């Protein structure tokens, strides 16, 4: 290993270390200064909002003080709130109306619950009359033949003993005359027997006619009695219902009057409540006006604060872009010098003094073809005027020995502005001569 190679390699590595340290300190100092400036620029400024009806103050911590109406608006608010509270009290005379109404409603219930003294007896008599009417009407509706036969049998039962007595008396008389067994072709018996038979036959006919008349009269009588009892029962029932209806009507009238009184109190209370609500709404108008003014003030202050924060953000972003560019430039320089120093030391160990400068030249020329990169991002511009990018090596670059992430320039971009710095690598991809790019 040559002495010159050792000195050159160590010098390059030392320069790279010092360069990185200096850039880091500069970036840290810039970042601290930026943080202080951003804190000062973004700090919230307290403000106050004042109108003819009220106002409010927003303190440095965002707290609100003095929110509400003032002056005449405050007097109006206090007066309306007092009126609203007064209207919430019970209306004058409301208690008396409620008491009287409750008494009438309760009395109506008592009347409906109490029994009528004459109602049970009247109702019972009506039921009995209707039952009797049903019986008579049922009897009037019976078959006349059956009733006639029954009456006929009763009449005949009354006539039969007398007819038997007359027949026996006639037979006794004929026996005493010796004519008991006399028979004639004309009569089939004695004239006395024929006369008795005719009299008995007429008696039977008269009994039948009498039975028919009696049955007809009884049916008419039963129908009349059924109608009379039905009419009386209906009248008694109607009277009982009229008594009950009259009592219910009186109870209903009493209940209606009581409910009217109760409704009147509710109407009074509702009217007062409406007045109270109206007064309450009116009382909050000055407060709403003050809050509206406060909202507008907050909106205006918010717009100003947003604009201020936006400007502060633009300032911070621009400053951080410069710091990123500075770091990228320093990182690129340090990386390149470190690679050069390591290469020089390795070259001195392998090839001696004769191959040193050729190796250094190969180290300075690095692959920078866009086709070997992914996730390419512009991070700034260095002092020499070159656009500095950061990227990740792709699979094609990995096959050529390039791994991880890197910072530098783009070969295709430099071909348009500095074609003398771009050459073709043995792999067929473009490489860049970084001499003078970092410093």
Image: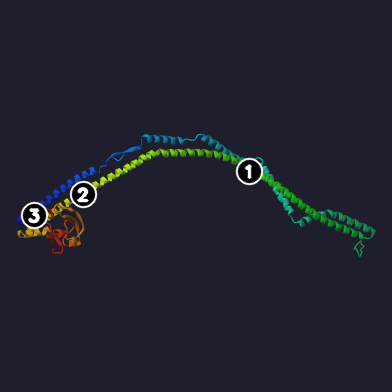
Disc tally is: 3
Q: Is residue 322 left or right of residue 45?
A: left
Query: Which quadrant holds the N terminus?
Result: bottom left
Direction front: furthest residue? 52
Between label 3 and label 1, give the one nearer the viewer. Answer: 1
Measure the C-alpha gap from mark 3 to mark 1.
Answer: 128 Å
**In the displayed structure, would residue 162 be above or below residue 69?**
below
| Disc ID at residue 245 | 1
**In the displayed structure, would residue 29 be above or below residue 190?**
above
At numbered mark 1, what does the secondary structure look like: helix, strand or loop? helix
Query: Which is nearer the N-term, disc 3 or disc 1?
Result: 3
Residue 5 pos. (x, y %): 6, 56
Q: Are marks 3 and 1 in contact (CB under 8 Å)?
A: no
Residue 31 seen by the camera: yes
Q: Which residue is mark 2?
A: 318
Direction right: furthest residue? 177
Measure the C-alpha gap from mark 3 to mark 2.
Answer: 37 Å
């Amino acid at each position: 290993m040559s002495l010159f190679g050792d000195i050159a390699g160590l010098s390059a590595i030392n320069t790279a270390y010092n360069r990185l340290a200096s850039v880091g300190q500069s970036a840290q100092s810039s970042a601290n200064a930026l943080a202080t400036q951003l804190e000062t620029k973004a700090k919230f400024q307290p403000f106050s909002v004042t109108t003819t009806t009220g106002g409010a103050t927003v303190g440095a911590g965002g707290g609100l003080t003095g929110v509400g109406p003032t002056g005449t608006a405050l007097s109006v608010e206090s007066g309306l709130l007092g009126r609203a509270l007064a209207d919430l009290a019970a209306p004058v005379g409301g208690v008396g109306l409620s008491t009287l109404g409750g008494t009438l409603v309760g009395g109506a219930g008592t009347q409906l619950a109490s029994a009528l003294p004459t109602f049970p007896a009247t109702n019972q008599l009506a039921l009995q009359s209707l039952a009797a009417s049903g019986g008579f009407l049922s009897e009037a509706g019976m078959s006349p033949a059956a009733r006639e036969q029954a009456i006929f049998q009763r009449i005949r039962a009354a006539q039969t003993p007398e007819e038997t007595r007359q027949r026996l008396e006639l037979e006794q008389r004929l026996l005493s005359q010796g004519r008991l067994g006399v028979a004639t072709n004309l009569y089939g018996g004695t004239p006395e027997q024929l006369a008795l038979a005719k009299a008995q036959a007429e008696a039977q006919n008269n009994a039948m006619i009498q039975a028919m008349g009696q049955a007809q009269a009884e049916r008419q009588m039963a129908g009349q009695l059924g109608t009379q009892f039905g009419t009386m029962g209906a009248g008694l029932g109607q009277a009982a219902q009229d008594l009950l209806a009259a009592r219910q009507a009186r109870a209903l009238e009493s209940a209606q009057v009581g409910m009217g009184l109760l409704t009147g109190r509710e109407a009074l209370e509702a009217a007062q409540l409406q007045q109270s609500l109206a007064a309450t709404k009116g009382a909050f108008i000055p407060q709403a006006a003050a809050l509206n003014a406060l909202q507008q003030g907050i909106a205006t202050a918010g717009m100003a604060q947003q604009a201020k924060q936006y400007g502060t953000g633009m300032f911070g972003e621009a400053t951080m872009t410069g710091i990123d560019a500075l770091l990228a430039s320093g990182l690129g320089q340090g990386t390149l010098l470190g690679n050069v120093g390591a290469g020089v030391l390795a070259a001195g160990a392998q090839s001696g003094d004769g191959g040193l400068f050729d190796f250094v030249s190969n180290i300075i020329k690095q692959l920078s073809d866009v086709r070997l990169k992914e996730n390419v991002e512009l991070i700034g511009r260095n002092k020499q005027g070159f656009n500095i990018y950061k990227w990740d090596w792709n699979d094609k670059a990995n096959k050529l020995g390039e791994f991880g992430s890197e910072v530098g320039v783009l070969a295709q971009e430099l071909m348009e502005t500095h074609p003398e710095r771009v050459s073709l690598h043995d792999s067929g991809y473009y490489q860049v001569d970084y001499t003078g790019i970092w410093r």
